[in-house]
Image (cartoon, helix red, strand yellow):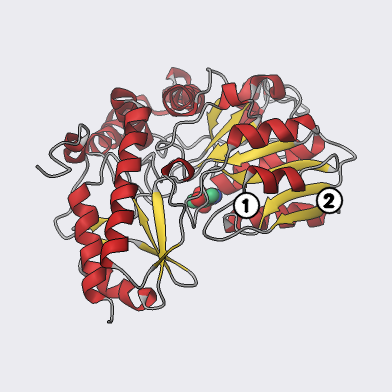
Amino acid sequence: MSRDDTDPLADCRDLFVADPTVVAYLDGNSLGRPLKASVQRVETFLREQWGGRLIRGWEEGWLDLPLTVGDELGRVGLGAAPGQVVIGDSTTVLIYKLIRAALDARPGRTEIVIDRDNFPTDRYVVEGIAADRGLTIRWIDVDAAFGVTAELAAAAITENTALAVLSHVAYRSGYLADVEGITTAARAVGALVLWDLCHSAGVIPTELDAWGVDLAVGCTYKYLNGGPGSPAFAYLRESQQSLLRQPIQGWLGSARPFEMGQGYEPAPGVRRMLSGTPPIVGLQPMRDMIALIDSVGIEAVRAKSIALTEFALELSLELLPGAVVASPLDAAQRGSHITLDHPAFESLMPILWRRGVIPDFRRPNGIRLGMSPLSTSFAEVELGIRMIAELLPR
Ligand SMILES: *Cc1c(COP(=O)(O)O)cnc(C)c1O
């Protein structure tokens, strides 16, 4: 019996759109595959909702979708009670809004903490805002094959810190940070932490409420299969909502948008994170993935994610002797992808992609294998790693 034969989630693969020329898709952590149900949903939405209801649709539920889909996501994958998650802009824009809001809530504090290996957009937004505000960035230097440990975070986050911006799963190594431990330590010195959940939402369960998280963002086109450029989500802890004001004061985040009145007053609750007209078409596909995760349970997704990364590591150590593992070996410290370094990997990428084996490449020489548990089979992982082994110069 193969590993796929004994996998309780194996049947889920048939629910995704399949292209016969793709034989091993190992990049679901960059862009998840579409569900067949989403193809149907988008078509129905265009024909019946947009086409049939037209402008009336706004009053018949569209305006609430950023909040209702947010609540579903919060319940199914984030450990968030209703009223704290909203679907909004891109992750980058939500990071900007939340950082600005957090800094305003910590006047007098002079530092923002972030690590050198955080995702570029997080670092760039922090750099821009720090320059604007005359704040100091306290950089955490990390081992690129690991990530921000609780010790590193505790040393950097002090009484001068307004905010730390950290990723739950490191985009390169896959290192899984101790969200609860770091958040608790930061709160003890009065600092806020903004958690970036891009590489964990939909695959690693979180308990945002129970862990005491104040602020989080994440994208929906990775393990939430929302499609290219699908809108991101923000989590704003209920007790923080009235204390935080985001800077892009648009009408749809205001208290009474249709009065068209003078002067901005933020909407109560998490709706205040919105600015302009929400992306109603763009948030349709993720609804199917959220429903699928709900039906199998996020814990089962995580269990298969661990099995897949363990299998990929095992095979890589056996078949790719020249490659260096640049990810944690302990599954408890690892998200749903692994990175392997080898100087020849960059030259293999075009051949792999042509042959329908699709991992991605991260400079300087890392191949990143992302396993999206509901759409990735063990056979696919094996085929991909065997093809890499075959192409590697000896
Ligand atoms: C993918 C990713 C992003 C992407 O931000 P966008 O605004 O959607 O382009 C941000 N942060 C992390 C950690 C990511 O992995």
The answer to whether residue 248 of the structure is visible from this angle is no
Give the answer, above or below, for where 313 lies relative to 237: below
Nearer the camera: disc 1 or disc 2: 1
User: For the residue carrying disc 1, how many other residues have a C-alpha within 10 Å: few (<14), some (14-19), or many (20+)?
Assistant: many
State which quadrant residue 357 falls in. bottom left
191 lies above or below 379: above
Q: What residue is drawn where x is 31% and y is 75%?
A: 348
Q: Nearer the viewer, residue 10 or 18?
A: 10
The reply to whether residue 241 is in sight is yes
Residue furthest to the right in view is 108
Which mark is drawn over residue 122?
1
Indicate the quadrant where residue 52 lies: top left
Q: Residue 210 location in percent, x, y?
A: 58, 21
Left or right of residue 129: residue 226: left
Q: Secondary structure at mark 1?
A: helix
Q: Residue at x 37, y 51 (%)?
A: 31
Badge 2 density bin: few <14, some 14–19, many ≥20, Cα 10 Å: few
Going by the numbered disc 2, the residue's amino acid type is: Arg
Q: Residue at x 69, y 38 (%)?
A: 193
In which quadrant of the rendered image does the C terminus lie? bottom left
Amino acid type at circle 1 is: Asp
Q: Which residue is mark 2?
A: 133
Determine whether the beta carbon of the residue marked 2 sits less than 8 angstroms from the nearest atom of ligand 1: no
- Quarter of image, res 294: top left
Instruction: Tell me: is circle 1 under 8 Å from ligand 1.
Output: yes
Disc marking residue 91? none
For numbered disc 2, what is the local secondary structure?
Answer: helix
The residue positioned 86% from the left and 41% from the top of the image is 109
- Residue closest to the far left: 1
Going by the image, does 185 lie left or right of 76? right
Determine whether, in the image, residue 230 is placed left or right of residue 14.
Answer: right
